[in-house]
Amino acid sequence: MKKNSTKKHTPFDRKFAIEHIRDHYAEPRSLIRALFDRWTVPGQGTINTSVDAKHAPVRLALRDNYLNFYVNGQSVGKLSAGSGEPHLEISRVYFEKASQGYRDLHRDSGYVKLGADDLLLDKPQALLDELIEIAGEKSGKEKRFVEHVMAANHNVLEVEMALPGDYSLASCMKKRENKLVAPRMDVVVAHQVAEGGMVIDFWEAKLATNGELRATLPENGGTKEPHVSDQLTDYMRWIKINGRARQVCNAFNSTGKALSALASMAGKTGPAVDLWHDLSQSKVAINPRPGILIGNYDPKCRNLGMFACRKSFSKHRTRLEKHDNPDRCFVIKEVDGIDPSDLAINVPLPGERL
């Protein structure tokens, strides 16, 4: 047994006190209202490879008691309301590049924390436009790939989903041995299934240039697994810890309810909103085995440049898909461009459901 295995484990949950932001949403001067006006639900928004972030859609991810807003996969801000009043945390780096008129909002820490009064501004949309452009331009290529996936799939529920650390998780990575391990998944997707209810799938998203997809092949003397295989094995071990799968299923029921309420408040419609409503009332199961999404194109290249290294990936793909150890086998989906049909994740992953 691990040294710290008797410590209390943090539950996995998803909720948000929407009643604490309704007044701000109704106030045209509020930065919260400006954020929700720019919020674009999954499956909507133009998919492009332009590096100009000024008009990029703003995405929302529900966490436990707060919301994360993203542009081009890069976090813009964290909105909390658990204390009864809303507050928004934004990187101070973004404010340092914003126009001179907003310098009085700076704080001494790495984040600017705006309280209820700070959130009321003369030109909230002007400030938000600046912050969105600055944050979006900081986005890396892999984050931009995740944005393309979100724009093409209305059934994406969450991005950058972090699982709570659990001392009873025995990591398969030596550098994590006897440490608190908190796996993270890039994309969470919901599917309505023929037998009724919803199944939740998880995907790891990487570009073809990411070295974590490869390791020296066994026939060439390699003894180590690709890093991505270790990542996903840790995740599967976490989800099979007693009680964790049920926590995640219940949390995504709550996700459906919270996202439905936020969409209703902000006047959002579309297939994503319909799915959230169904999710809130459905029996939820999860597939413990994630898939791997691989982008073979440069998400920042206007001409959709293809990565040359994709041509040498076939043997590494076979290793990931058809490993001798069945616990190391993963479905792989390669994406060659921004056509929505290429980016679509519309079929549930095969395998068991918990």
Image: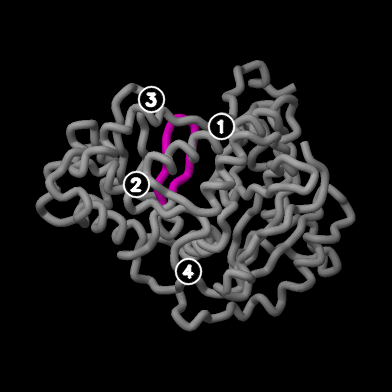
Helix, strand, or loop for circle 2?
helix
Residue bounds of the magenta highlight: 60-70
User: Mark 4 or mark 2, which has the lower sequence index?
Assistant: 2
Q: Nearer the viewer, residue 59 or 167?
A: 59
Using the rendered view, name the quadrant where residue 278 is placed.
top right
**Which is closer to the viewer, label 3 or label 2?**
2
How far apart, in angstroms, are the residues tagged by discs 4 and 1?
A: 29 Å
Using the rendered view, name the quadrant where residue 109 is placed.
top left
Q: Nearer the viewer, residue 20 or 223?
A: 20
The type of residue carrying mark 2 is Phe
At which x and y percent is residue 97?
21, 57
- Residue that appears at 78% across and 60% down: 320
Q: How many numbered tags mark residues here? A: 4
How far apart, in angstroms, are the residues tagged by discs 1 and 2?
A: 20 Å
The type of residue carrying mark 3 is Gly
Whether residue 110 is visible, yes or no, is no
| Residue for badge 4 | 47
User: Mark 1 or mark 2, which has the lower sequence index?
Assistant: 2
Q: Name the quadrant of the N terminus.
A: top right
How far apart, in angstroms, are the residues tagged by discs 3 and 2?
A: 18 Å
Q: Name the quadrant of the C terminus.
A: top right
The type of residue carrying mark 4 is Ile
- Residue that appears at 76% across and 73% down: 314
Q: Are marks 1 and 2 in contact (CB under 8 Å)?
A: no
State whether residue 83 is above or below residue 135. Answer: above
Residue 151: mark in rendering:
none
| Residue for badge 3 | 82
Residue 36: mark in rendering:
2
Q: Are marks 4 and 2 in contact (CB under 8 Å)?
A: no
- Residue that appears at 46% across and 51% down: 269
Residue 254: mark in rendering:
1
How far apart, in angstroms, are the residues tagged by discs 3 and 1?
A: 16 Å
